[in-house]
Amino acid sequence: MNAGFDEGHIITTLEMRMKCGVGKCGRCNMGGHFICLDGPIFTLEEIGRMHSDV
């Protein structure tokens, strides 16, 4: 963001939180979202909304 990019244009992966990859184990649950089912690629804006849901 210091370089002037908007939160909607910064993209990252949250694969490190995944274990089973099919939403069964719950390990990747983050703010009511399952990373393996809803992602694993997210914008910084989406990640910020996930944390506010916790």
Image (cartoon, rainbow, N blue to C red):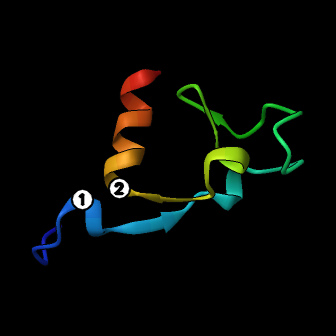
Farthest bottom residue in view: 3
1 lies left or right of 34? left
19 lies left or right of 4? right
Residue at image location 73% in from the left, 49% down from the top? 36
**Mark 1 Cα-neighbour bin, 10 Å: few <14, some 14–19, many ≥20:** some
Residue at image location 10% in from the left, 74% down from the top? 4
51 lies left or right of 30? left
**Mark 2 Cα-neighbour bin, 10 Å: few <14, some 14–19, many ≥20:** some
Residue sitting nearer the eye, 11 or 37: 37
Q: Earlier in the sequence, mark 2 or mark 1?
A: 1
Residue at image location 76% in from the left, 51% down from the top? 18
Residue at image location 24% in from the left, 59% down from the top? 7
Q: Quadrant of the N terminus?
A: bottom left
Q: Which residue is mark 1?
A: 7
Disc 1 element: helix
Amino acid type shown at disc 2: Leu
Q: Are marks 2 and 1 in contact (CB under 8 Å)?
A: yes
Q: Which residue is mark 2?
A: 44
Q: Position of residue 17 (x, y in %)?
A: 70, 50
Disc 2 element: helix
Q: Position of residue 15 (x, y in %)?
A: 68, 60
Q: Measure how far apart labels 2 and 1 are at the Cα level.
A: 5 Å
Farthest top residue in view: 54
17 lies above or below 5:
above
